[in-house]
Structures are given as C-alpha cells and as structure tokens.
Amino acid sequence: MSARRWLPALLLGCSAARPPVVVAPTDTTPPSSASAPRAPRPLSWGNTRGELTRELPRRADGRRAVTYALRLEPPQRVRIALRGSENLDALLEVRGPDGFSLTHDDVPGSLDAMVEFVPPSAGTYEVTATSANPRQTGPYLLAVSPRAPAVGVPLPPDGRVEGVYAPQTTDPDGFPGEWFHTEVRAGSRLRVRANSRAFDTVLTVLGPRGERWTNDDANDTGPDGSERALDSTVEVAAPETGTYHVLVNAYGGGSGGPFRLTSRALPPVVLHPGQDTPPGGLAGPDGRGRVLGLYAGITSYEHQSHLYGCADDARFLGQAFRASHLQGPSEQQVLTDGQVTRQAFLAGIDRLAQRSTPDDVVLVFFSGHGGTSPDARPGGDELSGLDATVVMQDGSITDDELVEHLSRVRARTVILALDTCHAGGFADDWVRAPGRVGLFSSDADVLSDTAEPRGAGGYLSIHLRRGVLGDADARPRDGVLQLGELTDHLHRGFVEDYLNMNPEGSQEPSQWLVASRGAVPWTEVLWAYPRGEDLALPPIPAVTLESPSIHGDDSPSWPSGRGGGFSDRSCPPCVGDVPGVVQAQLPEGRVPAWSLAPRPEGHGGCFGRR
C-alpha cells in the first residue's frame, strides 16, 4: 500500500498500536464451499469475530466476503468498525433501504475500516466484511456501537477554536483524533480549515448519513497568506440539516502539537417563487459574486464555409444558464451569426470588464471557425511563429488581441472557452495570470470537429452546457460546482466521444480537450445552484439542446465524415465554387466522399471541422 493510498477514503488518523478489544461471542458459523451467495448472518450491537477463508465463494469482484443483517432505527447514531488481522486489509460495506450505501477502506495508520452514520430510515442494513485485496483472507473483528448525537467540542459555524493533537489520545473505541461538532442547515456551505505549525494536519468532516469529506494538504497559504500549504481545508455543501462532525489528526499519525480550527458557514442560496435568479450573490468561494457571460457562435458565415450548430451552441449555453437560475437576461450577452463581428465581440468583452467585480465569475465563449496567422509582433512570443485566431463575420481576432481585451476583466475567475480549430493555441497566451482558466476544444495544431452526432456545433459546447445544467456537479452532487468538477466532466465527455472525433483507422492528429486551470485550484467554487424554499436541491433542468438540421428534411443523408462532422473549422477555401457542389481543398487534391453531395439550399462551402 502506498504512503497515501488511504487519503481518498480517509476517516481517522491512527498511529498507535491497535488497542485491545473486548470480544463478544464469536461468530462460529462454518464456512461453505457453495458458489451461491449466502443469506446474511444476524448481527447485533457489540463485537463479532469472523474469518474470510478460501472456502468462501468469490464475488464478481474476486473478493471473498461475509454479509450480516443489522436492524437499525433513527435517530440513533451508530459506528461500525472492521478490524482485520495482520495480513488482512479490511474493507467495510454497508447497504440499506432506499439505496443507502457506504464503503470504507483504511483508517490512516492502519488497515482498519470504519463508518459512522444516522440511519435515514428504520430497517435492515446489510454489513459486509471483505478485503481491499481480493487475494487476502484471515480473521477479523466487526464492532457495532452506539454513538452520541454530538461528539467532541462545539465548533461555532463562524468562529475559531484552539486544540492540541496527541497521537496517543484516543476515543473510547481506541481511534485517535480530536473531535468537534457543529450544526449546519441544508444547502449551507461550511468551510473548515485546520492550521498548525507543529504537524501536518489532516482534516475530515463527517455528515449525518456517513458522508465523508477529507483534505490533507490545502496547497495554499490560507486567506491571509500566512499559513502553510500543509494545512488542511474542507468545504462542504450540506446535503441536509443536522450535526456535522469535524476530526483533526496528523498525516502519518506520528506527530502532534497545538492547532487552530476555523470555520465559516455561508447560508443556502434560495430561489423564491417568481424569481429568475436569487437576490444577492451565488458565485465564488464567498458566495458574493455573480456569473456574467458572453456567448457567441456562428453557423452561417458570409465569407467563410458554413458550419453546423455553432450559433445554437451560443444560444443553448445562455439558455442553460437561465434554466439553472444562475443568470438572468441582464447578466448574459448572446451573439449569433450576423451579430458576431469583431467590433461586437470585443465590445462585449469590454462591457464585461466594466461590469465585473472581484467577486464575480466570467465566462467568454465562442463556437465557430478558428485558424492561425503569422505572429506579426516584433520579436514574436509564439514558439510556433503562429498566432491562433477566432474568425468573426468580418475578420479574425488573434490570441494577442483577444487576451488584451480579456485582461481588463477583473473578476475573480475568468474562463475562456473556445470550440474552434486550433483553439489550444490560445492557452499559453491566456493562462499567464491568477484567476484565468482556459477550455479549448483541441490542441494548437489540431482541427476540431463539429458534433452533429450530439446535436451540437462542437464537442466542447455540448459537454460544457451539460456541465452548466448540473451534470458536472458530481463529486458529490451537492449543489456547489467546483472548477475541478467542471474540468473532470469535460474530460469524461471527450473520452466518451473519442471515437466520434477520432475514428479508428484515422491518420489525422487526435482531437483532445485542452483544459488549463493555471493557478486556479481544483477546489475553487464557481457557483452554487439555487435551491427551493424547502432547501432541496432541484433536479437537473430538462432543456432541448439539439440543433435543427442544416440540411432540410428533403436533403440527402450525409455520410459520417471524421467523427460524423462534414469537414473542419479551419476555413480552408472551398475550391470550384460550383452551384450544388461542396468540395474541400485537401492535400494532393484528395476529395472526401461527402464533398460531392448536393449543397443544401441557402448554404455553401464546407460543413464540419472548424
């Protein structure tokens, strides 16, 4: 086991030798060699001994396991601990009514596993003792004990407490750590930080239903710049109202000393009937900011090849923000087709610069053609000698020019999202200062496909709008979107659509997402989704996102080109502009099979890659 293998499933710090336990009557049920799963064994309060043997049937995951049935009722809080033998890395699973599920592997410093929770409903819960390593067997001890509703020192929702961590200090069950508790309302955002000059802190927050949020290293210097990167910060969007426990221990468990625990609770963002967006802020880590946006897309170019669905990308992204109650009409600018000129797009950015504040999150988005041009600046700063460009109706905007205007926006976080060919060429120019994020549909030297199979102009566009609607809020789905959740969602989407963009047998460069967070951490909060008056998290809104076909109902079907698109968005000049013929200029005169299909009425030029 690696030094930090336990971190994602961290619950408690433990470095002392395993304390002795008082053992209740041993579970002596003999193992069976039958391959069919056995009925759960009865389990009650106290300690039960058992053993994982080679005679037990293997599950589908290869593990041997013993399952018990335990009757639980709210509001009694319960702790279930699984202690393995020297050669058994214990893994504990709990399943209950209505899909209740908890899994835990290692308590830091040992191979034990443990969960604590208030059962959401009365009923029978299945408790499974198994191993993290499918090949391991050996004896174990399963302990079930009641816990008080609130354990440890009260922690004010907005306050500070001092404490001392000692590795030899344990709770009555023999697990180390300093415990605190605080009351939190559903939808509130609780931020807790553990700071110490004496040891490397590890911070864990436990929710009422066994939820667990953990951090070892915050990798920042705290709100005033005076703390250590080894300090720990946990941010929780409370899924329900109840008692939340906070646990402080040391990484590795071998040191200790004084520490300071600070907390801050932001109230839930509530949307009342008749409101499009909630009053006050909902963006940024302090919840004081707004989400402001400029969304532009061009499907029908006047002097370039037409595309598929790019204007819809801009419209639907604005619609997604409104449907999620993150923006009202006054907080977004949507430009499509003939509206997207150089002057209009840059003026839109300048308006964002005038309106934005240091608490805001700003998103600038463009879907359409992209290209390159020689770097004209004296002594140019481009390693390739080329500027990346985005193509408006009346000309191109270079990366240098776009960054010059965007640099005037003083929001806390500014996201530039480009779904164009060569979009990644903007990354190094843009992400050079704090607070800047870049989302680009392809590398600097790679073309970007249109996403007609997805009913969108581009693959970045479709997955970005789905992320805005709530699909990205998944680690966990708690109504608060962190930047890392969004970029992870986009990466997953590009993996999902890899063969659409990069079909087997293609010899062209692979298209991949370029996501650059720069100095903005994974955990940076972008916004909180508004909740209803009952503080429940609303479902992901259903919004029609399919672009209408540009071919018309009576047009011939178009064979799927590279990724189902029709060409690229790099604007190669169309050759032989013969009515009714679409022919892309390709190396050595190659003509793709789709390029000789009749041109849909009102559309000319190339469709597809941008």
Image (spheres, rainbow, N blue to C red):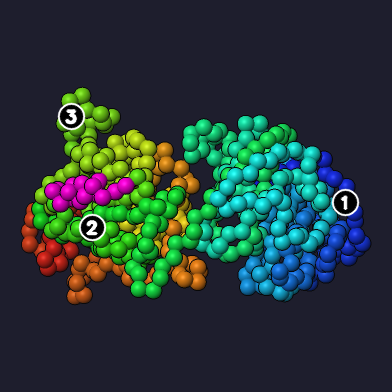
Secondary structure under the numbered disc 3 in the rendered image: loop
Q: Is residue 144 left or right of 212 when viewed as pictured?
A: right
Residue 221 position, x and y percent, is 51, 35
The amino acid marked with disc number 2 is Gln
Specify start and end residues of the magenta stretch as a single range: 342-357
**Residue 563 in view here:** no
Dot 1 or dot 3, earlier in sequence: 1
Dot 1 or dot 2, earlier in sequence: 1
Q: How many marks?
A: 3
The amino acid marked with disc number 3 is Arg
Q: Nearer the viewer, residue 322 or 68?
A: 322
Q: Residue at x 30, y 39 (%)?
A: 430
Residue holding disc 3: 377
Q: Is residue 111 left or right of 2 when viewed as pictured?
A: right
Residue holding disc 1: 21
Mark 1–mark 2 Cα distance, whole angstroms, equals 65 Å
Q: Residues within 10 Å of mark 2 (few under 14, many from 20)?
A: many
Q: Residue at x 79, y 66 (%)?
A: 68
Q: Residues within 10 Å of mark 3 (few under 14, many from 20)?
A: few
